Image (tube, rainbow, N blue to C red):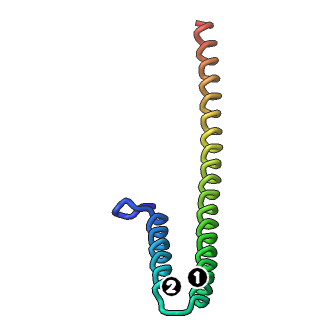
Amino acid sequence: MRDNNGHSAGTVFLSFLLGGIVGAGLAMLLAPQSGSETRKRIREFADDIKEKAEDYVEHIKKGITSTVEEGKDFYEEKKSAIAAAVEAGKKAYEKEKERLAKG
């Protein structure tokens, strides 16, 4: 899933997320407030980022699992088709061999 510039949606999302983290961190450090209030806000911010990162990782895991399952299904489908083609080739070979032996 790529846009016109060649960047995947995941890359764009991750860039947006990292930019937001940096911006929010700078805002917290530069805001005029007490040290305890700043520490509290940083702790809350870190917890929020951790939760968002866990959600993102879970989303990626589901996507990978889905893709792997589709790959397994595709492999099994093609494996059966190739096995059938090989078997048909063997039968055709044996039939032709018998025909040539008679003639």
Of helix, strand and loop, which one carries label 1? Answer: helix
80 relative to 34, above or below: above
| Furthest residue toward front | 35
Q: Which residue is drawn at 62% across and 73% down?
A: 50
Q: Which of 88 and 5 is in front in this view?
A: 5
Q: In this view, does 81 lie to the left or right of 28?
A: right
Residue 42 disc label: 1
In the rendered image, the vertical position of residue 96 relative to residue 36, given as above or below: above
Look at the image and tell me in which quarter the C terminus lies: top right
The residue that appears at 49% across and 73% down in the rendered structure is: 17
Q: What amino acid type should be assigned to the residue bearing mark 1?
A: Ile
Numbered badge on residue 24: none
Question: At x 60% / y 49%, what residue is drawn?
Answer: 71
Q: Is mark 2 on a helix, strand or loop?
A: helix
Give the CA distance from mark 1 to mark 2: 7 Å
**Residue 76: x, y in percent?**
65, 43
For the residue pair 72 and 101, the one nearer the viewer reads as 72
Residue appearing at x 63%, y 78% in the figure: 47
Q: Where residue 75 appears, x then y in whole percent?
A: 62, 43
Ranked by sequence position, the earlier of labels 1 and 2 is 2
Judge whether 67 appears above or below 49 on screen: above
Where does label 2 land, which residue? 28
Q: Are marks 1 and 2 in contact (CB under 8 Å)?
A: yes
